[in-house]
Image: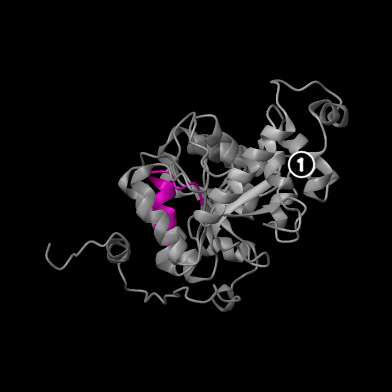
Amino acid sequence: MTDRGLLDLAICRIPGLSVRERVKLCTKFEKEDEIVILSKKDIEKILNRPIAPSWTMDTVRRQAEKDAKTAHIRGIAWESCVSPEYPPLLREIFDPPAVLFYRGKLPNPERPLAAVVGTRHPGPAAAMEAFGIARFLGSRGVPVVSGLALGIDAMAHRGNIEGGAPTVAVLGSGADEIYPVSNRPLAARILESGGAVFSEYPPGTPPRPWRFPARNRIISALARGTVIVEAPEKSGALITAGFALEQGRDLWIAPSGLRAAGTAKLASDGAGVLYSAESILRDWRMEGAENFCGCGKGVRKRDFSPGEPLASSLARSLDIDLKGK
């Protein structure tokens, strides 16, 4: 809990507000005592509109108290959008989360992140490419942010961990509600390797379909640039690409993505094709990124020999023993 007490948790639990309205309240108030004395009508007057459904501040505060206890038990911290610890690139967008909940460590604000996202059902080439790009970036001190989904997202997280960087996962549920369940071991590895799991939702919030497109704006906002590895038409990764462009971020597609309709369309519309992950470092003028400030205590950094097969690295990440094959 910060000096703001339960203020930010209470704002998260007021029903019927937009993201920007929650940000407005977080900015307006500085202490819990300033808001818990207000009524629904007081909040409506501040926002200049009626709010549905009905609620009382007593109910909101009781839920905030439950959230604080749950967060403490489950190792979840939070930062308001007005906190100096809040990721600066995230604060810049049109609709930043009013409160960012997280497990693990916040990324170093002076180290750029790269988003690597794509379909949940990639082809083998795209899956290997996602892993390889993220592994290379990790070996050069660049954390990858993705959505912890099956397919490309999971491969990107695994590759970044293998490369030695503190990868970041953004969820469409509470930070304690890992989805899909099959990626719980991967989430544990992310935290063990010094990374973080982010959410804009209070603890215990279940995954719902409409929450995943919303979380994509956070993935692209946290990153200096986004790589869409492979995406069919109507893919959620294309939503991330749209957010990246709106937010003024760099955008690339991986060569394997040229086989998929969605990413091929991005290329025809002018998105760059990332034929080498080194191009990201050159574009960002980070050729010496392997000497960039370290990844934090306990985070493993790996040096890759030119001849080390990508498959061997992937097998190690997945705990597959190739010797017996």
What residue lies at 71% left-to-right and 31% top-to-bottom?
Answer: 18
Q: Is residue 145 shown left or right of residue 98?
A: left
The magenta stretch spans which residues?
146-159
Color style of the picture: one colour
Q: Residues within 10 Å of mark 1 (few under 14, many from 20)?
A: many
Describe the element under mark 1 as helix, strand or loop: helix
What residue lies at 62% left-to-right and 41% top-to-bottom?
Answer: 217
Image-quadrant location for residue 36: top right
The answer to whether residue 209 is seen in the rendering is: yes
Q: Is residue 227 magenta?
A: no
Q: Is residue 279 above or below residue 297?
A: above
Looking at this view, is 18 or 229 the one in front? 18
Q: Position of residue 58 (x, y in %)?
A: 71, 34
Q: Position of residue 92 (x, y in %)?
A: 75, 49
Looking at this view, is 180 or 35 the one in front? 35
Image-quadrant location for residue 53: top right
Q: In the picture, which quadrant includes the C terminus?
A: bottom left
Q: Is residue 51 shown left or right of residue 124?
A: right
Q: Position of residue 66 (x, y in %)?
A: 58, 44
Identity of the amino acid at label 1? Val
From the image, tell me which residue sits under label 1: 23
Q: Is residue 158 magenta?
A: yes
What residue lies at 59% left-to-right and 59% top-to-bottom?
Answer: 113
